[in-house]
Image: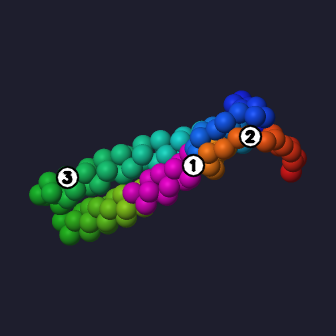
Amino acid sequence: MANLAVNVGDHVKKGQALFSIVNDQLGIAASSASQSLTQSKQSLESARAAKKQAQYDMDHNRAGGSATTNILENKLQSAETALEASQQNVTVSQAKYQSALSDVAKSSVVAPMDGTVNAVNVKTVMT
């Protein structure tokens, strides 16, 4: 526990901060999720560029025969699949990041109602 914001006898309002819980793992998880989201977004941009290049190659394949056309079609299809996977990865990473931020926000304990603090009893449990 850290940042005890009240003492016995203090009057508090509903939603007022009482204390914060120190949990380094929450911060580490949020930082890791943020890095993962950044990497996912970078991968998405790379996938977009690869698809754009594959589309360009397809559109400008004037001299290529059917074998070249097939190769370029496969390249474009692979780029589209990679782009879809990257978009899904960004969605998952964003959800994990929001969840980690939510967990960090839960480390603050607030008063559930207006009233007077009668006791401050907090027990540390090691897991």
Tell us which disc is closer to us: 3 or 2.
2
Q: Which residues are magenta?
A: 87-104
CA gap between label 3 and label 2 equals: 68 Å
Residue situated in front as seen by the camera: 25 or 107: 107
Up/down of 48 relative to 79, above or below:
above
Residue 81, how many percent across, how many down? 37, 64
Quadrant housing residue 111: top right
Mark 1 = which residue?
102
Is residue 11 shown to the viewer in this render?
Answer: yes
In this picture, is 38 found above or below 53? above
Is tag 3's residue or tag 2's residue first in the polypeptide sequence? 3
Instruction: Give the percent coordinates (x, y) of residue 90.
Output: 44, 53
- The quadrant of the rendering that contains the N terminus is top right
Dot 3 crowding, Cα within 10 Å, few <14, some 14–19, many 20+: few
Q: Secondary structure at mark 2?
A: loop
Q: Earlier in the sequence, mark 1 or mark 3?
A: 3
- Please say if the residues under marks 1 and 3 sit with CB atoms less than 8 Å apart: no
Label 2: how many Cα within 10 Å (few below 14, some 14–19, many 20+) = some
Mark pair 1, 2: CA separation: 26 Å
Query: How many numbered discs sit on the rendered protein?
Result: 3
97, 15: nearer the viewer: 15
Q: Residue furthest left?
A: 62
Where is residue 24 drawn, in percent x and y? 72, 37
The residue to which callout 2 is attached is 117
Amino acid at pointer 1: Ser
